[in-house]
Amino acid sequence: MSRVLDLPPRPLRWLFLDLNSYFASVEQQLQPSLRGRPVIVAPVGSDTTVAIAASVEAKRYGIKTGTPVWEAKQRCRELVVTPARHDRYVQFHDAIVAEIERHIPVTRVCSIDEVACRLLDNENAREDAIALATRIKAGIRANVGDCLTSSVGIAPNRLLAKLASDLKKPDGLVVFEGHELPQALFGVALREIVGIGPATERRLSRDGINDVAGLCARTPRAAGGAWGGRDGDRLWFLLHGIDLPDKATQSRTVGHSHVLSPGRRGPEPVRLTARRLALKAASRLRRKGYRARLLVLHAKFEDSKDRWQCSARLPATQDSFTVLGHLDRLFPQLREAGRVRPGGFRMRMVGVTLAEIEAAESEQGSLFALLPPDDPLARETRGFALSHAMDRINERWGRNAVSVGPLNGGRLDRIGTKIAFGRIPEASEFHE
């Protein structure tokens, strides 16, 4: 039996807004013929890809993010599949954030379809917070798009506000007040709490914790011991409504991946696509002011869900030509892995990731530029300057105004910029 701790006041501090079926809802807003119909958004027009978003109507058939397109079509004969338009999703995101800012400052953009707002003392009474949430939801539908519904959670900390927003969809509004905690969470499954995945759930179960009530019944230290790792007691305090400061985080990778269209899954289109992805990643690395020490080439074959990958050490660099040189030395490993497969070289997805990144030093003139032209250090210095020049040209004149060859492998898929979970592309990325 845990001892009772005296907890400080836990006023409502966070309003968390989650757009419902965001990508699919934007498509329904842009295409009136799709409204009220089951819709999924897919990366390319192939049944071998998966849904990256499903409309509210499609979800009623058990279709969700990650459902294979062929399976989704079997579940719903009336299903409409529409290609992703990530630039439009960013445009709508910006309009939604601007609308929310008319009512309350946005404290944190958590993802393309989620924002968190901190409530001040003059707006955090239950009735006031609910009225604010209602105005925001109505404002988005009236001023951005009437297909864009949202679910809102209000709670003493951001984790619980996020959890509350997930409990009633679509178009929900759930409030957890401090005096209701943690008892109000006892009906919530452990897996529904951010940070608890299958491995953590099994570890807690081995320690005799099978639900939220069991976790909260422990002392903070005992709960942290069951959780394992550093700061294991944080979750206990968060579930009790304590508003803890965020832990510092640091970006560790920069990368891009692409699902290939059925006619572009052979060795040469895959190689050229990987080069384009590497150029995009290197350009983004420079824009963020980082350099990388590791290059990872990864892929998925048509006949397997497992990810294949290989890697190469880099000198600390942000130069496109250095990255491409190491990628060219890695690609034969991928070619060989595909050659020995029963179905031959048939690639569904290819990706390039730059890892072990660190802040780049301030730019300054390089003495290496004075070395003989064929010296490796001189070549890297010129390559870095050329990489920057390419960035500036593409930013001004548009994607692929200038690129690095060869481009003689036939028409490639349009790669474009994709939206990863938790990361919203900058407008300039759509010109890379």
Image (tube, grey):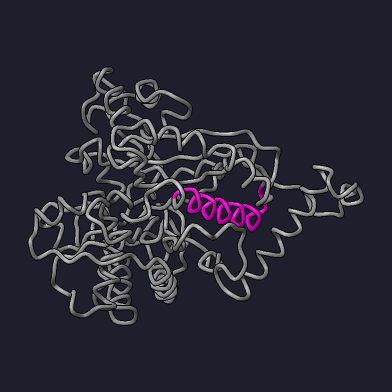
Place of residue 146 in the rendered image (x, y in percent of width and height, measured from the top left): 25, 78
Q: Main secondary structure of the magenta part?
A: helix
Asked whether, in this view, residue 383 is left or right of residue 34, the answer is right
Q: Which residues are magenta?
A: 270-290
Asked whether, in this view, residue 41 is left or right of residue 391, the answer is left
Along the viewing direction, whichever of 153 and 218 lies nearer the viewer: 153
Q: Is residue 289 above or below residue 308?
A: below
The image quarter containing residue 119 is bottom left
Q: Is residue 352 above or below residue 412?
A: above
Q: Is residue 365 above or below residue 179?
A: below
Place of residue 16 in the rendered image (x, y in percent of width and height, measured from the top left): 35, 58
Along the viewing direction, whichever of 199 and 225 lies nearer the viewer: 199
**Residue 273 within the segment the image draws in magenta:** yes
Which quarter shows the N terminus? Answer: top left
Q: Residue at x 38, y 56 (%)?
A: 14
Place of residue 225 in the rendered image (x, y in percent of width and height, measured from the top left): 39, 20
Which quarter shows the C terminus? Answer: bottom right
Asked whether, in this view, residue 412 is left or right of residue 192, the answer is right
Place of residue 270 in the rendered image (x, y in percent of width and height, measured from the top left): 44, 49
Q: Residue at x 10, y 55 (%)?
A: 61
